[in-house]
Image (tube, coloured by chain):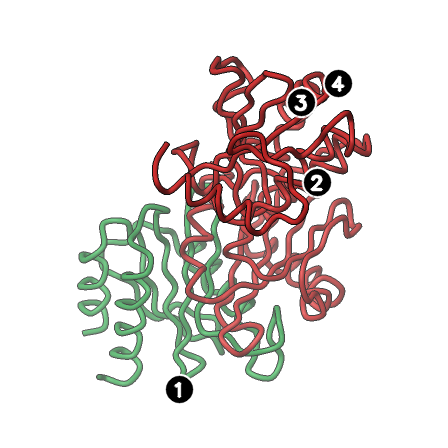
Amino acid sequence: MSDHSILSAKLAALTARDAVFVGQARVISDAGQPAALAAILAEIDATVLERLLVFDIDGVILRLAVSARRLRGLLDVNGACDALTGNVLSTEDPAMLQATGTLLTDLCNNAQRITVKTEAAVPFGNPAELGVSASVLTALWHKGQVLTPRSSLQGFLAAQDDLLSDYLCIIDGRIVDSQGDITALNLIWRDQLTPFRTAQKSAFPRRTGPILICLDAALGNGRAAGVAMTGDEIGIFSCSAPNISRLLAEWHRFTG
Amino acid sequence: MVTETLDILHDQFPGCQTLAFADLSTQMVLVTNSGTTDSRETLDALCAEAALAFGTASIPALGTCATHTIFVSTADQLHIYLRDTKEPGDALCCICRHDIALDRFVIAARSCLEQISHGL
């Protein structure tokens, strides 16, 4: 064990109130208290920096890549890899999420003692893939909620959270998702988009397929506005003007 | 003179297909780069889309403020429209490929438009 991990363990021991340690591992669930899966999810929720969490569930060693209160994925179970390990989890892949939840639930079933050790992060997947937040996992795995599949455009908008500050997603004329301050975006949706699209179609009547329009200063103060359309789905968003080129590249990848 | 200026910009960027200097108030393309193969119909549509998207100074087409650069990305092309900041009737309409060096191109295209509009 490196000096770094010893120091981490000591710091964890100092900061954890009423924590019980077995060696350098902290007990997070004992005799089913608190519930095993809830205890694991609470550890993910408490992990802000990128870390490797090593859980010992009655002798089964589970290693999870965790960062920013999100589970990025499973590294291995008892040192073995299978179809569920090595993948960055995403709400875009509900089947993988559900299967991972089932595995954890099975491991936690009747577990008598669970301990956790926090270790330095190891390379795992693409760093840009963030994983799934503990709150979403709690809703899915602990409260039994069903993940509603996102529309493709909704997924695109949500995935650009480093580029887009506010957005609206509209499907079949109904707002299905929104983020941030949508006051100005609502104006575009309610009053401006239909006449704009009608006139644009008359200029290019043979144009079909997905389209993205970005206007560099349409919202003032260096804020750009944009409209993304594919099929019956419309996204209206704001972003910082310097982000437009990256956004266009992402859109081309998405629709290409 | 204007054609030469457009040709210089065009030749700097392999991903640039067509450049058209237009008057938005009359929605007319005034001059293009010399090598363009786009039809008059396409150029007119390009100019019409630019005029539509920019709107007027008091009534923007989309949003709440006047804008000076607009990007329209379709499956096979990227249209870029630049409006002069001092002469809002002057616009440069560009048809590009998606792989164009976008940030560099926009800076160069803005400079080209100013050169044409103001003789800089």
* Number of on-image labels: 4
Calculate the distance from the C-alpha at mark 2 to the C-alpha at mark 4. 21 Å
As shown in the figure, which amino acid type bears the numbered disc 1?
Lys
Q: Nearer the viewer, residue A22 or A167?
A: A22
Residue that numbered label 4 is attached to: A109
- Looking at this view, is B111 or A154 the one in front? A154
| Residue B40 position (above or below residue A208) | below
What residue is rendered at 55% in x and 45% in y? A13
Mark 1 and mark 3: span between their CA atoms?
Answer: 63 Å
| Mark 4, secondary structure of its residue | loop
Task: Kindly identify the amino acid type of the residue bearing the numbered disc 4.
Answer: Asn
- Distance from the alpha carbon under mark 2 to that under mark 1: 50 Å
Dot 3 falls on a residue whose secondary structure is: helix
Q: Check the residue under mark 1 and report the chain it is in.
A: B
- Residue A38 position in % (x across, y down): 74, 34
Task: Calculate the distance from the C-alpha at mark 2 to the C-alpha at mark 3.
Answer: 15 Å
Residue pointed to by mark 1: B86
Label 2–label 4 contact, CB within 8 A: no
In this structure image, what is the colour of chain B? green
Mark 2 neighbour density, 10 Å: few (under 14) some (14–19) many (20 or more): some
In front: A255, or A143? A143
Which chain hosts label 4? A
Q: Amino acid at mark 2?
A: Val
Q: Earlier in the sequence, mark 3 or mark 4?
A: 3
Q: Is residue B81 left or right of residue A59?
A: left
CB atoms at circles 2 and 3 under 8 Å apart? no
Indicate which disc, 2 or 4, sits on the residue closer to the N terminus: 4
* In the displayed structure image, the side of residue A204 where residue B113 appears, left or right: left
Residue A149, x across and y down, in percent = 71, 33
Tag 2, which secondary structure? helix
Element type at mark 1 = loop
